[in-house]
Image: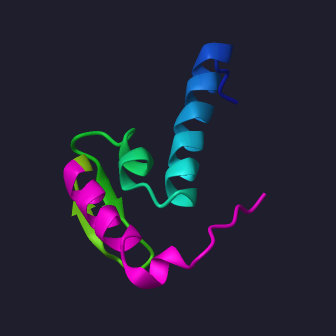
C-alpha cells in the first residue's frame, strides 16, 4: 500500500475536482489545466491527442458543439 502525506492527497483531490468541474461546466481550460505539456490522451472512441494544447483544443471544440450544451454530466460514486 502506498502512503501519501495529507498535502499530497489534498493536491490529488484538487486535480480531480478541477477536472470534474471542467466537465460539469463544459470548460475545456479548467478540465485540462493539470495535464502535462507532453500528456498523451486517448478517449473511448480512440481519438488521440498529444500535449495539453492539443487536448485543450479538442475538448474546447467538443464542449462547444450544440448537442453537447444540452447534456448533463453525472458523477458515478
Quadrant in the picture for residue 55:
bottom left
Say if 74 sits above or below 30 in the image: below
Which residue ends up furthest to the right in the rendered image?
A: 77
Quadrant in the picture for residue 74:
bottom right
Q: Quadrant of the C terminus?
A: bottom right
Magenta segment: does it hold 11? no
In the rendered image, is residue 48 in sight?
yes
Say if 8 sits above or below 38 in the image: above
Q: Which residues are magenta?
A: 53-77
Apparent side of residue 15 relative to residue 27 in the rendered image (left or right): right
In the rendered image, is residue 51 in sight?
no
Quadrant in the picture for residue 36:
top left
Judging depth in this view, the residue of 26 and 10 nearest the camera is: 26
Q: Residue at x 53, y 57 (%)?
A: 25
Magenta segment: does it hold 61? yes
Residue 64 image point, x, y percent: 36, 71
Principal secondary structure, stretch drawn in magenta: helix
Residue 58 image point, x, y percent: 27, 66
Q: Residue at x 63, y 72 (%)?
A: 72
Amino acid at each position: 500500500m502506498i502512503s501519501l502525506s495529507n498535502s499530497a492527497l489534498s493536491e490529488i483531490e484538487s486535480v480531480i475536482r478541477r477536472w470534474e468541474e471542467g466537465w460539469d461546466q463544459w470548460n475545456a481550460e479548467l478540465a485540462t489545466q493539470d495535464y502535462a505539456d507532453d500528456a498523451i490522451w486517448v478517449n473511448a472512441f480512440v481519438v488521440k491527442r498529444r500535449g495539453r494544447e492539443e487536448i485543450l483544443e479538442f475538448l474546447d471544440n467538443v464542449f462547444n458543439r450544440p448537442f453537447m450544451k444540452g447534456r448533463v454530466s453525472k458523477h458515478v460514486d
